[in-house]
Image (cartoon, rainbow, N blue to C red):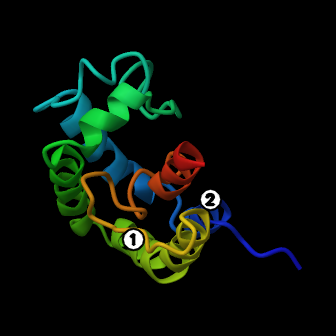
Amino acid sequence: MREEGPQECGECCSTKSPGAAKIANDAFDACLCQTPGACKTECAESFCGGAAGADKEPTEACWTCIDSNGVGDACDVKADTACDGDAACKALDACHASACDPIFEKEEAAADGGAKFQQGSGGPSSSRLNKLSAAAKRSSRRQ
């Protein structure tokens, strides 16, 4: 039996709370790309470009902006606040935290040669951005 990865885990959690991720995703996207739009310019051709909810992988310039000066963390707080007001979104976050975060941390540790992944390092948490899940995006970016 194949072990589930963070992306599959995130998809499983999403099926339990369909549509719930949109609440948090929309708040995160608005913070990053519109108001205050701290990375609007750096992410214009990737994450912030195109239709709302599009699955666009951030460019290196976009990731640098997200990871700098607490931008990702600040937008994550806005997304968490939006999510806290919705029971289905809170259930989705709980599923990610209990089921998916440990899988992601295990994969990160293996990819980093045993070094523990540091959450809260300036980017969105692994339970945020269910577009592909930040965990899967960060994992693919760092491999």
| Residue drawn at the location 40% of the way across and 49% of the way down | 22
- Report the mark closest to the observer, 1 or 2: 2
In the rendered image, which residue does mark 1 sit on? 93
| Residue drawn at the location 30% of the way across and 51% of the way down | 123
Residue 64 vertical placement versus 87 (above, below):
above
Q: Is residue 64 left or right of residue 88?
A: left
| Residue drawn at the location 49% of the way across and 30% of the way down | 54
Q: Could you tell me which secondary element the residue under label 1 belongs to?
A: helix
Give the residue furthest to the bottom.
98
| Residue drawn at the location 39% of the way across and 71% of the way down | 93
The three-letter code of the residue at mark 1 reads Asp
In the rendered image, which residue does mark 2 sit on? 7
* Residue 106: image location, x then y, percent: 57, 76
Residue 121 vertical placement versus 44 (above, below):
below
Name the residue nearer the viewer: 54 or 102: 102
* Residue 37: image location, x then y, percent: 17, 29
Q: Quadrant of the N terminus?
A: bottom right
The three-letter code of the residue at mark 2 reads Gln
* Residue 103: image location, x then y, percent: 58, 75
Q: Could you tell me which secondary element the residue under label 2 belongs to?
A: helix
